[in-house]
Amino acid sequence: MERNQIILVAVIVVIAVIVIGLAAMMPGFSKEKTNITVQGGNDTISQGESIDVKLTDVNGTPIDNETVNVTITKVNKTANKTVNKTVKKKTVHTNKKGVAKVKIDEDPGDYIVDCTFSGNDEFEEDTATAEVEVVDYDDTDYGSESQSDDYGDSGAYYSEQEGRTIYTGEIHDAPDGHKYMHLGYNEWEMID
């Protein structure tokens, strides 16, 4: 080989190594796929009940302490068309089982619940959508519903997060620059 050909091959090898190195460092190149599901969606629930949003990796391993953005949209059907109106946006956080509770306290009717995990340095983003019919609260069930300790949150008074107690109704500044109010059941609502 002539000297020019050797130099050309060396330059091509160096460029290939640089391109492969840059590709390996790019965000998303080695992120793990996720699976977000809505449990209790596509169902009829009583006003004030919750549905669960579960976030796992592709192997089914729960992903905890992650933020899921939830949009609740009212579906208004008429004879000629369907008009959807967003009624609430909230942020919830997954527990150690990868589950976040979303309380649906909207007026009776049909709703679409869109859940989005935006991803992070380790995991890819994912979305899930469910349709929920909300009916009037049925107070004929006089039994008591026990709240599991899996959430570390009774939903009524406090939430254990980051080693401190956060009371329902408290307002905190979030890293995204917005203010959020704690709603209980490990749920947060953006208020600005």
Image (tube, rainbow, N blue to C red):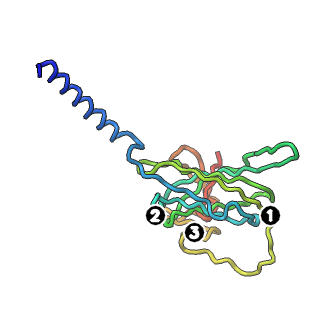
Q: Is residue 168 visible?
A: no
From the top left corner, tell me how far across and down residue 177 is, in percent: 54, 43
> Vertical placement of 29 versus 51: above or below?
above
Q: Could you say whether the residue bearing mark 1 is in a helix, strand or loop?
A: strand
Residue that carries the numbered disc 1 in the rendered image: 135
From the top left corner, tell me how far across and down residue 77 is, in percent: 83, 49
Q: Nearer the viewer, mark 1 or mark 2?
A: 2
- Who comes first in sequence, dot 1 or dot 2? 2
- Who comes first in sequence, dot 3 or dot 2? 2
Residue ranking furthest to the front: 1
Q: Could you say whether the residue bearing mark 3 is in a helix, strand or loop?
A: loop
Q: Could you say whether the residue bearing mark 2 is in a helix, strand or loop?
A: loop
Residue that carries the numbered disc 2 in the rendered image: 61
* Along the line of sight, the residue nearer the viewer: 128 or 92: 128
From the top left corner, tell me how far across and down residue 92 is, in percent: 58, 57
**Left or right side of 95 for 2:** left
Q: Crowdedness of circle 2 by 10 Å Cα count: few (<14), some, many (20+)?
A: few
Quadrant of res 82: top right
Give the amino acid at mark 2: Thr
Residue that carries the numbered disc 3 in the rendered image: 153
Q: Nearer the viewer, mark 3 or mark 2?
A: 2
